[in-house]
Structure formats: structure tokens, C-alpha cells
Image (cartoon, rainbow, N blue to C red):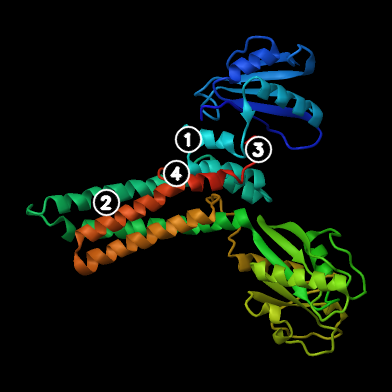
Amino acid sequence: MQDTIAAIATPPGKGGVGVIRVSGSKAKEIGERISARPLIDRVATFAHFKDANQETIDSGLTIFFAGPKSFTGEDVVEFQGHGGPVILDLMLKQVISLGARQARAGEFSERAFLNDKIDLAQAEAIADLIDSSTEQAAKSAMRSLKGEFSKKVNALLKELIYLRMYVEAAIDFPDEEIDFLADEKIRLSIEGLQKSLDRTIQQAGQGAILRNGLRLVIAGKPNAGKSSLLNALAGQEAAIVTNIAGTTRDIVTETIDVDGLPVHIIDTAGLRDSSDAVEKIGIERARKAIIDADHVLLLIDVSDQGSIELSDFPELNNASVTTVFNKIDLLSTDNQFEGIALSAKTGEGIESLKAAIKKMAGYAQENETVFTARRRHLTALSQASDAVQRGLDQLRIYNAGELLADELLQAQDALNSITGEFTADDLLGEIFSGFCIGK
């Protein structure tokens, strides 16, 4: 936290504008030396950026944000120049030569958290916003970044703290005439808290679905139409389609937006015994993709005269599977299928499949109260809910105030871990290491 850090804050490659971000006690001094002019808080200053020999590296805008009224809570300087990778590299080298060091991944956001500019849930929402693959996912991440998730957690904490004060007062003053633990108000308050936790868990679950999406594998025999189905869902020619069995030799992944739900569709090599060395590798990758999938679409070619059973595909034994019958456009009569029937070629039945995909994920469309959430948030909320329920049982069955107080404390600790009130350093390192460098 004592070092001044610097990084390129724009993506790799060429662009119209490139940004170098600097944060720390030396930021203003570095900014003024490179810009060769004084900097005023929150004023964009045009300058020619100079190297150690006073030769111009680039020209553009320098903006100074005085701490603590900055993103990180420290003095921050941004150099906004041209977006060429060589120019940005020269600028970064010059900044580092003047006393800064290369920032670690996520270190700017980490400093904002450590300086109490944002809480941990908001910091994670920054990365989720950048990684959003659908409009709904971006909206939910922005809600968390604005603090909506944190407000719900803090409201739950407020209820918990009030209950703890009430229960511990009953424990500390046992000689009072009124038995606080027998007061119906405590039981009703705990039950109300449990309902609030349940609602928050449901909303956070939807946020986790939007953040992570659904990993959906299309599996089946060669020529069942797996690549055609991928293309039909993606709305473009993402995979090569031919009548030759075994055309797909490797997995092909495409992310699509199903009414706001990110779906990561994986087309795989046809499952069969093969003597082709390259195809064998593709089949092994298909089997691994099935193991890692959230859900599998087992695609069946209705024009295939051979009997087809799930036992034909031992890879699917432990998978969550939905059977999809393809090529119904080749049938001359109406048929009844125990599963989803469609034609990847004509598009018939595709909308029904999309509705089924949303159901597979447990996705509730267009929920304007959803905020982004991670698995650790769901775990913490679940731990808090379990602790509250155990505490309620202790009160109902045993009238045990001390055990109730302990369970409420555990629930409070679990909720505090979401916003970072009490968070282990190794967890912080794990969280911020997944951020972009420069953010």
C-alpha cells in the first residue's frame, strides 16, 4: 500500500486511445514530470509526454484526481494518449523509471476496497461488469456495483445485530422479572430474518446464473446434426457442417444470449468407436466436456433406423441430460417424442428448446431486482441461513439463549464475509488475482 503503482488500463492491441493509470503518493509528481506542467485536481490538461531526455513520447491529456476523492482513495493520475502498444509500453517504462512499479492484477480495485471506497461485493462487481456476456448480466453487475447487493446484506446484518443485543441482554440480566427469551417477539423476529435471508438467496441465485451462465454440451452420434444445432442457436455459421460423419474433430464453443441468460454452447465430436487417431482425440475431449457440463443435450437423429438408448452413451451416466430429437423435417407423419423435437435445418422447435434451456438453468427472465452474485456469496448466505435456523431450533426446543446467541454470531460472521468486513488475506488475493491488470 506504500508503493505507487502503474499499469496500462486499456486492452492490448491498437486503438484510438490508450490509458496509463498511476495511483499512490508519487502519482502527482510523476504526472507533472512527464507532462512538464502543474496538474490541477479534476482538470484535464493537454501535454506532450516527455521521457528522461525531454524528448516527446506522445501527446494527449493528463488528469489528476487528488485522494481521497479518487477511485482508489489515493492520488491518481491518468495519461490518455494514443492507443499504440509501442507508445503505451514506452509511457509505462517512463512512469516506472520515475518511482512507480507495475501493478498486480486487480490492485487498483483492491486499494479502493482497502481504502473503504467500495466494499468487497462492489469490487467483485467491477470484474463481473467487465466480463458480462449479455445485457441482463451487465445490468445485474451494475446493480451490485451501485451497492444494491451490499444494502441487502447490510439490512440483514442490522436485523441480526438487533437480535443479538436483545438475546444477550436476556442472558446478561437473568434476574429480571421479564423472560426475554420467552418473548414471542424474538421468535417472530428470527422467523422474519429467515424469510429475508431466503428472499436474498433466491435473488443472489439468479445473479449467479447471470454471471456464470449455463455450460451446455451438445452430444450424440456422428451426423446427428450437432453442429447444425449449434449454428441454429447461435444464429451464425459457427461450426462446419457436412454430410461426412466425423467432420467435427474438436470442441467448438459459442456463447449465445437466451433472453438475457448467457449460454456457453459446446459442440463436440460424435461419440463412436473410431480408428482415426485425430478423431479419437476429439472424442476424448467430448467426453471431458460432458463431465464438465452443467447440462447435456443428447441429440438423436430421428431418421436413424437403429435403436438408440442412453446406454449407448456411457459418458452420460452421471450427467444431467435432456434428449433432443432432430431432423423432424424428414418425417412424413406426425410423431410423438419423449423429449424436445426440432429441426436444426428449418428452425422448427428452436424456440421450444430455448425455453427448455432457461428452465434447465432455473432462470427467471427480466427480473429487475437481480444483482450479480458469486458462488462464495451463495455459500455465505446459505451458512447464515443455516445458522439462523439452528438458532431458532435452540430457542423453540431448549430455550437455550447462549446457543442461540452463538448461532446468531456465526450468521453475522458469514454475512460480513460477503462485504469484506472480516475476510482472510488469502481470499482477497484469490479474488483480485482474477481481475484485469489496470483495474
Q: Quadrant location of residue 353?
A: bottom right
Helix or strand or loop: what does disc 1 sit on?
A: helix
The answer for how far apart the CA atoms under marks 4 and 3 are is 21 Å
Crowd class of label 2 (few under 14; some 14 to 19; many from 20; radius 10 Å): many
Crowd class of label 3 (few under 14; some 14 to 19; many from 20; radius 10 Å): many
Residue type beneath disc 4: Gly
Which label was assigned to residue 437?
3
Label 1 with label 4: CB-CB less than 8 Å: no
Q: Quadrant location of residue 71?
A: top right
Residue positioned 52% across, 41% down in the render: 122
* Disc number lying in front (4 or 2): 4
Q: Is residue 143 visible?
A: no
The residue that disc 4 covers is: 420
Helix or strand or loop: what does disc 3 sit on?
A: loop
The answer for how far apart the CA atoms under marks 3 and 2 are is 43 Å
Residue type beneath disc 1: Leu
Label 3 with label 2: CB-CB less than 8 Å: no
Q: Is residue 90 visible?
A: yes
Residue type beneath disc 2: Leu
Crowd class of label 1 (few under 14; some 14 to 19; many from 20; radius 10 Å): some
Vertical position of residue 307 compared to residue 168: above or below: below
The residue that disc 1 covers is: 114
Task: Assign the C terminus to one quadrant of the image.
Answer: top right
The answer for how far apart the CA atoms under marks 2 and 1 are is 29 Å
Which label was assigned to residue 163?
2
Q: Earlier in the sequence, mark 4 or mark 3?
A: 4
Foreground of the two, 60 or 432: 432
